[in-house]
Image (tube, rainbow, N blue to C red):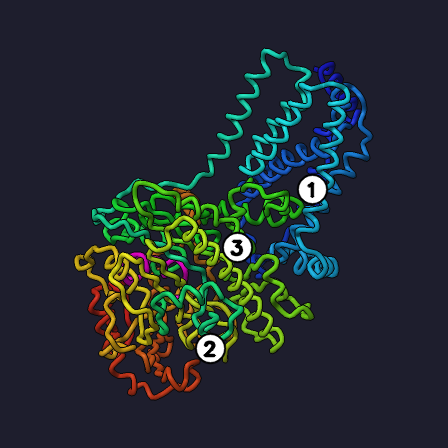
Amino acid sequence: MSEFWSKFKNFIRSEFNSGNPWIHSGVFVFVLTLLCLLTNTSLHVMGVDISEFISLFYGLIPLLLRDLSGVFASSYAFFVGVAILFLGPDFSRWKTGEKIEIYKIYLILVSVLFLLFCGSVSEYPQVYGEFFYYRHSWALGFLYFITDHFSPFFFKSALFLFLAIQVIRNGLYFWQSESYESLLRYAVFIILFYSFHILGSAWGILSASAFYSFDILISRSKKDLIFVAIVILGFGFSFFTRPQRENVISKEALEHSSNTNVLIISADSIRQDQLGFVKGEKNITPNIDRLSSESLVFLDHHSTIPRTFPSWADFLSGKYSFEHGIQDMFPDKEDRSKLGNTVATLPGILRKSHRTYVVSSFAGDIFPRANWGFQNVYAPNFSAETLTQQRTIESQVFFLPVLTGTFFGGGEYLSSIRSLPSLGDDSRILPDLFSVFDKKDRPFFALYFSSVTHFPYSPPYPFYKNTDPHYYGPSKYFRFVDPSNSEKPDKKEQEQIRSIYSASLTAFDFSVGKILEELKRRSLYDDTLIILTSDHGESLFEEDHSHGHGEHLRGEGVTKIPLIIKLPKSFERKEIRSFKGITSSLDVFPTILSVLGASSEKFSLHGKDLTRLPKEDNWREDRSVYSETGIWFSDRGDHFFQKDRIRYPNILELHTIDPNDGNSVTVSDSYAKETVLFSKHRMLQTRTKKLIYIPSPNGVLYTCYDRISDPWNTKPLPASLCGDLQRKLDLLLVGSGKWRKAGDYFLPKSEL
């Protein structure tokens, strides 16, 4: 054994001294991994300090170690390939027995990493927000210098020029030495390296690099077999991340002959009043504005709940949260059991007649977690494993440029990169949507859900340039939401936050333009029902409303969202116009079925078919629509909604991790779930009035507002003026069979 170790050490020493790039790339990556681990790890999540809850994360240490190993393996595979590519003829000479000067390897790796880092920072500064603002604020000057003076194209061009010079030098070396077979193998290696890079296959890159590096040790008869094995292995690993496919077909699935495609285009947290055609500003959302000019536009449209998971459940089922069971952001198996089974969903109903898809980034991590009925899900999952991999990725900042695609594009080496809240760039997911448009035997039903407008807001280059160039505060490129912080920033900071939100909206609009262009290019536009909407709105420091969504129902910011419906040409033409009557997200379900020629009567829906509007621009009756709050993530702060509510613990204390449910993060304790439901604020509003039901420790509060003269709800009226809405709210909740009254309180029936 001692002789073996002696030979092994001598071998390693010899290879190290010879400039073996496999060894030195490993040293390079190991040192960077360790440095990042020591200097770039914190207990901040989206800017919120969670250090007091550190004991909750001890059980996740095995996952964190596994993820760190995964990052190290992926980064090592990439940088070994990069070293081989950029060493040029030096590497080829090393293969014949010559030495490589060690400093060249590290100079190349450092140079490539520097160009990658600068290019990524200039394209996605918000991805590095925690790195620069919360961990290494001393380097902020470097961040501002890069983003103020350089575009991503500059660094990518420099990187390309560097690579081209080395590739040409190596090609000439082979040509001049008449090593034509080596030249061919080098060309094949470049093709394989880039192909596996685009697929995000670290194993493929590692295998291709090994095959090219050590071909002198392999007999010719075995080379072809190994070559084939490498291709199969690399491509095989790349397909492990293909979208999940659901096999459950809804019992309510319909068969009909409509050839109409359905495309729902949405982004998280879009406020209706922020769109260009609503504000009267042409440069904010020009593509959405053009779509609205060809569509039915609903000017008083509202979400049923300003939280993503239950909002989409309401939208796709046509039912309220207390009917389908998903009433918060962290439903457990029991909560999710009805959806797609006893409660039908649009994609489940249409999957016999349509190919059903959902495409999303981090805000769409709800879609793999429930049976929505989609046959194809191009979206990340949300679980404890996702969270640990995210934290690992964010801490290993040297590999982020590769994961963000700065090296001439690139695939998702690590699955959780699509889950990063700071990387909502639509260009990363648009190709998935465009693949849906391929001609097939059936029309498509597709939901596209962008994350770019969800906080921390992530407009990529050049959209983040649409803000004040002279502002250099903490919200220059992004804005995290701390639900426990009730301090209101100064006016300049508020303006910047609204500005970065608007830049995100413009980035989304650019993607909308690409989608519509692609539909027209494929001659699909006229045959497609297009619906543009959102899951909920966003408070942006209006009055005392703070920032974010889900916590309250005051004002027009959190529930009032866009609804634009472009009907297909095959549908009986209706005049293109704006409708002022109040509408609900539950209305979309029967509207889609109506356009497709299918009946919605058997589904017992609450919504209205919006293809059957009155001739006037308003409802003939005084229609009312319902909304409720989500789960409160924090029990702290001096917000008005924290003062008047039933308190329960912070979400980090409420949640559990279920290893039998894919390590899902849920609120599963029955008492906690019922407390959350009991504590919700609930709202009923008409075109002119709004009633908010607020259960508090001191009794139930009813607040009444005039929506016309007081849109931000700063002047409460006597509750008696909304007495009719109070009676309607009682009828809605108690009549559903899910609630009972105990005094003035609504109690979930399961509690009694």
458 or 188: nearer the eye? 188
Circle count: 3
Mark in the foreground, 3 or 2: 3
The structure residue drawn at horizontal position 22% and vertical position 48%, both measured from the top left corner, is 257
> Would you say the magenta stretch is mainly helix, strand or loop?
helix
The image quadrant that residue 88 belongs to is top right
Mark 3, secondary structure of its residue:
loop
The structure residue drawn at horizontal position 48% and vertical position 30%, both measured from the top left corner, is 236
* Residue on which disc 3 sits: 424
* Residue on which disc 2 sits: 640
Q: Is residue 321 magenta?
A: yes
Question: Earlier along the polypeptide chain: callout 3 or callout 2?
Answer: 3
Quadrant in which the N terminus appears: top right
Q: Is residue 662 left or right of residue 3?
A: left
Inspect the image, locate mark 2, and give the three-letter code of the amino acid beneath it.
Phe
Distance from the alpha carbon under mark 2 to that under mark 1: 55 Å
